[in-house]
Image (spheres, grey):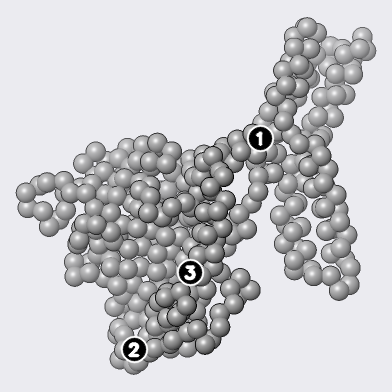
């Protein structure tokens, strides 16, 4: 029995790759932040955010240290004839837990996307395929609305332009809730559909596409906009996507002259429209900066699963075969109807896991 335990010990020492110095630095920082939160004049809001980020990491560190200590104590008991049998029973159970605890700790140590906890702006636009692409874009809208319902998120349409047959020409929505951007960011890219269009009399399968963009909502501190850079126009509109009859000049169009970005909002209140349009504009400008930084970093990355190139084809929805394929991770599921009803958890969880695996490989390379 002792020989087997010694062998496990040697294997464990080879496989253990937890950066102990980094753990100590995190614990020291957590203690410092915790102490500073009681100081008069301290930036309590900033300290509170850092405390909230560090606390779950420190909890994982403490769990890992406790388990390691329990293993060391049990190993020491092997030299005690009276305690040896107890130690031999306990050590396999403790060692069996160690890989899982180490993995959870490694995941906790991965660098966090500062935008993960933010609300998101969701944009959907038809691509190639004419009216069929617009109808597919409307299908994607319903899919995300139902997914938001399943997650308990709030889904608010900011701007929607419909086609003659009920498809989408453009959709901008605000999604709010816990961890919205952390999950939805993997949806950015080109979504392709293969099916027989309702307008096709010959029964031929057509391929069309729609583009989805998910942007983390910006705060005023993220982007400073010079009012002199804005051109603001008001216009007569019928509400978001024709949902409301509105005969006043309430719709607002804001053009950011330096970037050329144009944002519109068509709610009933002109004041509210200006507020919404400015929020969307800030978000797009903030996203431009994030995309620029991501592009610079990705040049040195071995892999990138997250919200990468939005011109990339990320997913295919094949109606004749009832399947969905995510091309980034080679995941194929034969339950297309459920997915289009908002059952996206399995797909997104797989993308998150792949992204974490890629980051772990980079961190440990």
Distance between the alpha carbons at the discs numbered 2 and 3: 22 Å
Residue 335 locus on image (x, y percent)? 33, 41
Please tell me which residue is depicted at 76% across the width and 16% down the height of the picture. Answer: 10
Distance between the alpha carbons at the discs numbered 1 and 3: 34 Å
Please tell me which residue is depicted at 42% across the width and 48% down the height of the picture. Answer: 344
The answer to whether the residues at label 2 and label 3 have Cβ atoms under 8 Å apart is no
Marks 2 and 3, the one that precedes in the sequence: 2
Marks 1 and 3, the one that precedes in the sequence: 3
Residue carrying label 2: 235
Q: Residues within 10 Å of mark 1 (few under 14, many from 20)?
A: few
The residue at the far left in this view is 202
The answer to whether the residues at label 1 and label 2 have Cβ atoms under 8 Å apart is no
Q: Residues within 10 Å of mark 2 (few under 14, many from 20)?
A: few
Q: Quadrant of the C terminus?
A: top right
Residue carrying label 1: 364
Q: Which mark is residue 284?
A: 3
132 vs 323, left or right, is: left
User: Relative to residue 266, is residue 14 depicted above or below?
Assistant: above
Residue 215 locus on image (x, y percent)? 49, 63
* Between marks 1 and 2 in the image, the one whose residue lies nearer the viewer: 1
The residue at the far bottom in this view is 248
Foreground pick, 106 / 358: 358
User: Relative to residue 180, is residue 361 depicted above or below?
Assistant: above
């Amino acid at each position: 029995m002792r020989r087997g335990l010694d062998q496990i010990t040697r294997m464990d020492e080879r496989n253990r790759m937890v950066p102990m110095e980094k753990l100590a630095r995190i614990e020291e920082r957590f203690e410092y932040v915790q102490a500073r939160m009681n100081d008069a004049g301290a930036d309590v809001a900033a300290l509170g955010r850092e405390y909230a980020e560090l606390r779950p990491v420190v909890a994982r560190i403490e769990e890992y240290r406790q388990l390691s200590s329990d293993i060391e104590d049990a190993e020491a008991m092997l030299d005690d004839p009276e305690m040896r049998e107890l130690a031999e029973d306990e050590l396999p159970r403790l060692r069996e837990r160690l890989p899982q605890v180490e993995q959870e700790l490694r995941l906790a140590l991965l660098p966090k996307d500062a935008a993960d906890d933010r609300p998101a702006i969701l944009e959907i636009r038809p691509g190639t395929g004419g009216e069929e692409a617009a109808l597919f874009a409307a299908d994607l809208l319903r899919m995300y609305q139902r997914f938001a319902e399943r997650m308990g998120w709030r889904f608010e349409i900011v701007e929607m332009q419909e086609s003659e047959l009920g498809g989408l020409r453009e959709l901008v929505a605000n999604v709010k809730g816990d961890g919205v951007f952390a999950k939805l960011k993997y949806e950015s890219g080109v979504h392709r559909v293969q099916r027989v269009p309702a307008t096709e009399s010959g029964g031929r399968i057509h391929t069309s596409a729609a583009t989805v963009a998910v942007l983390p909502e910006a705060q005023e501190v993220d982007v400073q906009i010079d009012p002199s850079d804005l051109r603001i126009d008001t216009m007569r509109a019928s509400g978001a996507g024709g949902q409301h009859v509105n005969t006043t000049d309430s719709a607002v169009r804001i053009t950011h002259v330096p970037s050329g970005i144009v944002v519109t909002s068509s709610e009933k209140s002109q004041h509210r429209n200006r507020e919404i349009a400015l929020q969307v504009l800030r978000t797009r400008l903030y996203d431009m900066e994030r995309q620029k930084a991501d592009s610079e970093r990705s040049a040195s990355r071995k892999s990138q699963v997250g919200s990468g190139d939005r011109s990339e084809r990320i997913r295919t929805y094949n109606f004749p075969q009832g399947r969905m394929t995510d091309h980034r991770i080679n995941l194929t599921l034969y339950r297309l109807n459920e997915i289009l009803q908002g059952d996206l958890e399995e797909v997104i969880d797989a993308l998150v896991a792949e992204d974490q695996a890629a980051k772990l490989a980079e961190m440990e390379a």
